[in-house]
């Protein structure tokens, strides 16, 4: 019983993670293309404005790197980001990195001029979002399943033994 519940819990977490990756992959590609276009057509000031708007409307902290691995806005980047940025620069697939509090996604893209860039975004979990409540929700469901299982077993034990008790 417990193994089945843990198996179901594990598969739900994997399923939620794969759904997140699928949606994030599509969205990040579009954001990356737009960021590269804004940078090439409007320069660093327009890109800064666009990235600030993105940060205001969602729990993300985005940025854009050139093909040499330098932030196009000249900002210092966390050394932790660099391996992810370099991985993303070698493939067109969205690269994911997760730590305890955030997920970082990086996507290679091309601007209208054909220059290569790597867009990244750090996604901070909302206070009651899927990153924080996923495990809690899973544990609540698991507890509900265990409680219902116990109640069914008690009822079944009573149902089976009641004829024996009547005979005495």
Image (cartoon, rainbow, N blue to C red):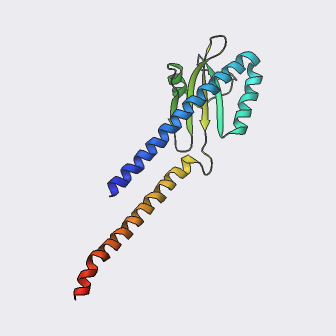
Write the residue at 62% across / 47% down: 126
**Pick the front one: 78 or 28:** 28
Write the residue at 45% across / 42% down: 15
Q: In which quarter of the image is residue 24?
A: top right
Q: Position of residue 23 (x, y in %)?
A: 55, 34
**Pick the front one: 157 or 73:** 157
For the N terminus, give its image quadrant. Answer: bottom left
For the C terminus, give its image quadrant. Answer: bottom left
Q: Is residue 16 above or below residue 120?
A: below
Task: Answer with left or right where residue 153 lies relative to residue 133.
Answer: left
Q: Where is residue 131 in the image (x, y as percent from the top left)?
A: 54, 46
Write the residue at 56% across / 47% down: 130
Q: In this view, does 95 lie above or below 39?
A: below
Write the residue at 68% across / 39% down: 58
Q: Where is residue 164 in the image (x, y as percent from the top left)?
A: 23, 82
Residue sitting at the far bottom: 168
Task: Answer with left or right where residue 15 lies relative to residue 29.
Answer: left
Q: Position of residue 72 (x, y in %)?
A: 67, 21
Residue sitting at the far top: 113
Task: Answer with left or right where residue 41 lies relative to residue 9.
Answer: right
Q: In which quarter of the image is residue 14?
A: top left
């Amino acid at each position: 019983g417990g193994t089945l519940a843990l198996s179901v819990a594990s598969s739900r977490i994997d399923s939620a993670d794969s759904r997140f990756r699928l949606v994030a992959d599509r969205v990040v590609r579009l954001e990356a293309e737009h960021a590269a276009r804004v940078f090439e057509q409007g320069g660093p000031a327009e890109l800064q404005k666009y990235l600030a708007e993105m940060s205001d409307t969602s729990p993300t902290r985005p940025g854009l790197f050139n093909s040499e691995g330098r932030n196009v806005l000249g900002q210092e980047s966390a050394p932790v980001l660099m391996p992810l940025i370099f991985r993303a620069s070698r493939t067109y697939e969205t690269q994911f990195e997760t730590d305890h509090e955030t997920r970082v996604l990086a996507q290679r893209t091309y601007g209208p001029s054909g220059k290569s860039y790597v867009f990244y975004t750090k996604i901070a979990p909302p206070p009651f979002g899927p990153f924080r409540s996923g495990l809690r929700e899973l544990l609540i469901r698991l507890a509900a399943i265990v409680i219902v299982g116990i109640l069914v077993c008690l009822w079944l034990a009573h149902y089976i033994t009641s004829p024996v008790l009547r005979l005495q």
